[in-house]
Image (tube, helix red, strand yellow):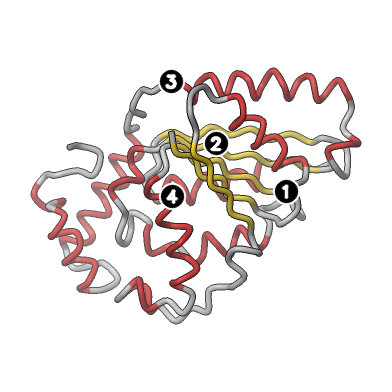
Amino acid sequence: MKIVMLNGQNHKGSSYTIGKKIIDKIDGEKEVREFFFPKDLNHFCIGCYNCIEDGTSCPFYDEKKVILDALYEADIIIATTPTYCMHVSAPFKAFIDLTFDNWMVHRPVKSMFYKKAVVVSTSAGSSPKNAMKEIEDALFNMGVPSITKYGLSVQAMNWEEISDKKKAMIDKKTTRISQKLSKGNKPGIGIKTKIVFNFMGFLQRSGMGSSPVEYDYWENQGWFNGKRPWKN
């Protein structure tokens, strides 16, 4: 089983620790790759739109490619971020901005429709809801059909300061999540994904996409003729 862990900060804090616990509890042999933002992608999107015409033309393509190739090959994605000012960390948001050309509205990648993902976020006080939602939205728009969220206010500045009671609760929750991930079943495609994909296909087929390159991409995939990325 191949697992990719995306972390919204360089240090290994509470969100990272919880994500790692989930990975460690997953049954079977695992090949795990970890990426940390900003260490592994220290750039912001500059709005050049080069990626719309050619994904390899992004000025930061070489660094992105290493991460995206790992995502495409993974079975499971674990995304963690601290909650900063009630939202996702800036480095993780930068990663989202730099990969939007792989969303369903542009040029989605078939393998993303076969993955399971978990989004983890902790906060010292405020709700982590917004931080998780931003990553969930990005993964959904990339085609990921199964996304589990786990967020909580730990009332602490680091893992060591979290109360034993909350750590026991975290242990139970991470066990349940890992048990779900350990099942080898293929995730089902929800009606929301089908509706969004079909609508984006309508826009592309009608010439309302962002570029002719996208039209050609959809046509070459056979998606104008009834094929779907989640079907063999």
Query: Callout 1: helix, strand or loop?
Result: strand
Residue at which label 3 appears: 183
Q: Splitting the image into 4 quarters, where does residue 207 fall?
A: bottom left
Q: Which mark is residue 71?
A: 4
Q: Amino acid at mark 2?
A: Val
* Residue 118 placement (x, y as % from top left): 55, 36
Dot 1 or dot 2: first in sequence order is 1
Residue occupying the point 79% across, 19% down: 168
| Observer-nearest of 211 and 20 | 20
Quadrant holding the N terminus: top left
* Residue 175 placement (x, y as % from top left): 63, 20
Closer to the camera: disc 2 or disc 3?
3
Query: Callout 3: helix, strand or loop?
Result: loop
Q: Are marks 2 and 3 in contact (CB under 8 Å)?
A: no
What separation in Å lies between label 4 and label 1 (alpha carbons)?
21 Å
Q: Which mark is residue 118?
A: 2
